[in-house]
Image (spheres, helix red, strand yellow):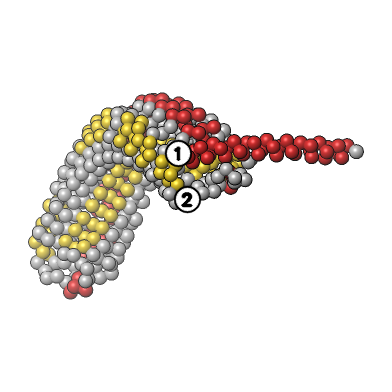
Amino acid sequence: MISKWRNCQILMLFPWFFIVYMSAGEQEAQLLLQFKEGLVDSNGSLRNWNSWSSSPCLWNGIGCFNFHVASINLYGFNLSGSLSSSICELRFLTILNVSKNLISGPIPRGFAYFRHLEILDLSTNQLHGEIPSELCLLASLRKLFLSENFLYGQIPSAISNLTALEELVIYRNNLTGTIPSSIRFLKNLRVIRAGLNSLSGKVPVELTQCRSLEILGLAQNALEGSLPRELQELKNLTTLVLWQNRLSGEIPAELGNCSNLEMIALNHNAFIGSIPRELGKLSNLKKLYLYTNRFTGTIPSELGNCWNALEIDLSENRLTGIIPFELGQIQSLRLLHLFENLLQGSIPRELGQLTQLARIDLSINKLSGTIPLEFQNLTSLVYLELSDNHLHGVIPPLLGSTSKLAILDLSNNNLTSPIPPNLCKYEKLTF
């Protein structure tokens, strides 16, 4: 008897649940339709967003959880028009992705009313205006992607309120001003990508208080001054990309304490002094780009301890001394560019051990001696530039015989031998 009564209760409650569900679904559908009104859907990707559809959970780009709209993903739908803040009333929305479209206009300030939004991706559109400070009220936001738009103005200092933020990606805009010191409060921040803007001032020392930081990308801005020594506090840092700024001073030796660094790109700046030998402690380093600066002194032999390096480019500096033979220990090396320096001495024969090496450019130096016969063993060699040096002797007769050599420039040296017949087999070889 009791079980029958319970079954009866369930049957009595079910219609009420169904009515509540339908009511909530209809309300969310109306909000989405209002959002659609601001968009131009030239591909018809949103054709099933209509008032007679049974549930918005079945609409293109809509994801639901517990019968509520939880995500909107309109990536690459070729939409234009503008964004409406009507969807801010979607109380259960956690993801909004409208990236890679042609949407224009400003970012609605009403987006501040998203209660549970965790991911906001508006990248690769035609949005303009300032980054609304109201976005900094999104307490649950973990990822903010605004890159490749026409946004201008400054990074809001209120960004410190986004304490859950893990990724801030705002590159390729027209942002100006300095990086706010309040960024130090973002203890969960792992990624900053703000390149291709017009940011000025120094690399703020406060950034080094973001101890979770893994990627720091501020290339192609107008940053100046020296690098803070406190960068050594970023023990999780894997990528440091600051190329094409106005940075100066010496690279702090303490950078060698960032043991997880895999990429350092400081090229096209005005750094001076010696390349720190402490960089040789970076056993995880894969790419080292220090070219087009004003470095002096010698190439540290300790760089030969960067066992995992793939590319080393120290070209267009004022480096002197010899090429350290220790570089021949880096078996993974694919690219070695040392051109346009003041390097002397002979080319280390140890470089001929690097079977992965595809590109060597040692041109425009003061190198002497002969071309190492060991270069015949470079089975991956595609590009060899040794021009404008003081090399003499013969061209190794089997050079390029086991590789796909495409570019060879030995001009402006004192070589005496004729071109080896082996090189004549290459129809596309450029001398």
User: In the image, what residue occupies the spot 25% across and 53% down?
Assistant: 336
Mark 2: few/some/many CA within 10 Å (<14, 14-19, 20+): few
Asked whether, in this view, residue 296 is left or right of residue 184, the answer is: left
Residue 28 drawn at (x, y percent): 58, 37
Residue 251 drawn at (x, y percent): 26, 36
User: In the image, what residue occupies the spot 12% across and 70% down?
Assistant: 418
Q: Is residue 422 above or below residue 65?
A: below
In-front residue for pair 124/141? 124
Q: Residue 38 carries which label?
A: 1
The amino acid beneath tag 2 is: Gly
Secondary structure beneath label 1: loop
User: In the image, what residue occupies the spot 33% across and 51% down?
Assistant: 309
Residue 373 drawn at (x, y percent): 21, 65
Mark 2 — residue?
44
Specify which label sits upstream in the sequence, 1 or 2. 1
User: In the image, what residue occupies the spot 57% across and 43% down?
Assistant: 51
Q: In which quarter of the image is residue 182?
A: top left
Residue 268 drawn at (x, y percent): 23, 42
Q: Is residue 402 above or below residue 278?
A: below
Q: In this view, does 312 lie above or below 199?
A: below
The amino acid beneath tag 1 is: Gly
In-front residue for pair 63/160? 63
Asked whether, in this view, residue 211 is left or right of residue 404, the answer is: right
